[in-house]
């Protein structure tokens, strides 16, 4: 069955907006742990906070903005979030201290529209097409993540951290133009007027929803923690200068995407979500264990990272699709807000705990705090 004109239009708009925001943000993930240490007042804990604070403000605002989009309409809330994203990028670009970067990242995170974008896509897609379109968005997020992870270290040949923050502001501005052109004005109409507390209670009662919420928190906590350690270890233990990290990331990301995309297509065709999710959580657990145990053996350590990233992308693409099937239409914005909030709580926790657990004089290794974080992830992965 072919897509309708509005399904194609909104899908392309949502994918483009997600990609612009994700590339703008993920360009920073592999370089912040190294470059932010040059700013006034920087410590590993504050650098970890600068990575994780984005997740905290995202977590705080995903639910209320998702609920507001159910009342006001998706378009005005998306525009409001993109404006805050641009403002945060400008503040961080002008910063001269680590505190300024933290403030800018916090403001960027306040543009918490991931759930609203997914709700917009759910609004216009037919049930028989929705899972496929959600999976397409998940794949685009994975591809954007991969592109950004490769591009970030490469661009440090020519650009500073300040320049990268200016890039995020430009990306957000392009996103505003995309919304004006791609989202019809009549989508600003009120969709639903369910009171906030009632909407939250209804979401919590949806069977299976809280499992999805807990799962997405777990995978983002672990992935952010891993990405806090990965560039440090490459730089300080394996002697890979930051501008050369792309030589590691590029083949890894190509390998990961070559596996993830067929897996997501297979699960949507065969409806084998449970088998794939169990396999992905098993892979994540094995990857985390081996990532910790093989951190003095480059090849084994990189293969562990690849397994973690494969598992993460499979889960990232599958969980929103499952959620869209579970939740009734009038609660999609609220439920996706709850889901995205949990996702970014995990990102905040992973960044802060990993940063706090890094020794200043031996920063390529976790202290006891970091080891405890990985043990927690192993236990939680096995439980999931």
Image (cartoon, rainbow, N blue to C red):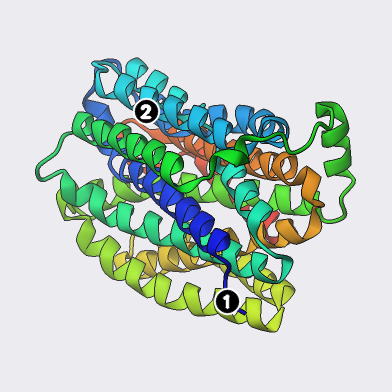
Q: Residue furthest toward the left?
A: 158
Residue 3: image quadrant is bottom right
The vertical placement of 289 against 188, above or below, is below
What residue does disc 1 label?
Answer: 2
Give the residue displayed 73% in from the left and 47% down from the top.
332
Give the residue displayed 21% in from the left and 28% down from the top.
162
Give the residue displayed 61% in from the left and 48% down from the top.
120
Bin the neighbour count of mark 1 within 10 Å (Cα to Cα): few under 14, some 14-19, many 20 and up.
few
Quadrant where the N terminus lies? bottom right
* Foreground pick, 8 / 61: 8
Q: Is residue 186 left or right of residue 199?
A: left
Quadrant where the C terminus lies? bottom right
What residue does disc 2 label?
Answer: 86
Q: Are marks 2 and 1 in contact (CB under 8 Å)?
A: no
x and y, in percent, of residue 152 in the image: 25, 48
Compute the Cα span from label 2 to label 1: 36 Å
SS category of the residue bearing label 2:
helix
Q: Is residue 356 left or right of residue 273?
A: left
x and y, in percent, of residue 169 in the image: 31, 32
- Nearer-N-terminus badge (2/1): 1
x and y, in percent, of residue 311 in the image: 54, 66
The vertical placement of 382 against 236, above or below, is below
Q: Is residue 168 left or right of residue 196?
A: left
């Amino acid at each position: 069955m072919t897509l309708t004109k509005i399904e194609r239009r909104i899908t392309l708009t949502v994918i483009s907006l997600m990609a612009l925001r994700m590339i703008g943000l993920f360009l920073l993930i592999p370089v912040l742990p190294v470059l932010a240490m040059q700013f006034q007042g920087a410590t590993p804990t504050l650098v970890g906070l600068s990575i994780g604070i984005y997740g905290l403000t995202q977590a705080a605002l995903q639910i209320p903005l998702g609920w507001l989009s159910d009342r006001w309409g998706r378009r005005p809330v998306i525009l409001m979030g993109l404006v805050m994203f641009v403002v945060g990028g400008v503040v961080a670009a002008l910063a001269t201290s680590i505190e300024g970067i933290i403030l800018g990242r916090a403001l960027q995170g306040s543009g918490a529209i991931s759930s609203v974008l997914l709700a917009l896509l759910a609004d216009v897609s037919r049930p028989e097409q929705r899972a496929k379109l959600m999976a397409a968005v998940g794949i685009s997020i994975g591809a954007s993540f991969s592109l950004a992870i490769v591009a970030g270290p490469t661009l440090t040949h020519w650009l500073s951290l300040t320049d990268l923050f200016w890039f995020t502001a430009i990306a957000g501005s392009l996103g505003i133009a995309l919304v004006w052109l791609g989202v019809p004005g009549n989508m600003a109409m009120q969709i639903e007027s369910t009171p906030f507390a009632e909407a939250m209670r209804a979401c919590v009662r949806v069977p299976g929803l809280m499992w999805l919420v807990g799962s997405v928190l777990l995978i983002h906590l672990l992935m952010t923690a891993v990405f806090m350690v990965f560039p440090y270890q490459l730089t300080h233990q394996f002697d890979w200068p930051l501008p050369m990290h792309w030589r590691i990331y590029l083949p890894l990301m190509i390998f990961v995407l070559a596996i993830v995309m067929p897996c997501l297509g297979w699960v949507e065709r065969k409806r084998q979500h449970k088998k794939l999710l169990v396999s992905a959580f098993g892979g994540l657990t094995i990857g985390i264990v081996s990532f910790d145990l093989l951190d003095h053996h480059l090849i084994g350590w990189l293969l562990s990272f690849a397994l973690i990233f494969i598992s993460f992308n499979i889960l990232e693409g599958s969980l929103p699709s499952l959620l869209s099937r579970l939740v009734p239409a009038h609660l999609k914005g609220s439920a996706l807000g709850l889901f995205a909030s949990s996702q970014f709580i995990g990102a905040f926790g992973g960044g802060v705990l990993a940063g706090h657990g890094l020794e200043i004089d031996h920063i390529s290794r976790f202290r006891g705090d970091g080891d405890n974080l990985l043990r927690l992830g192993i236990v939680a992965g096995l439980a999931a």
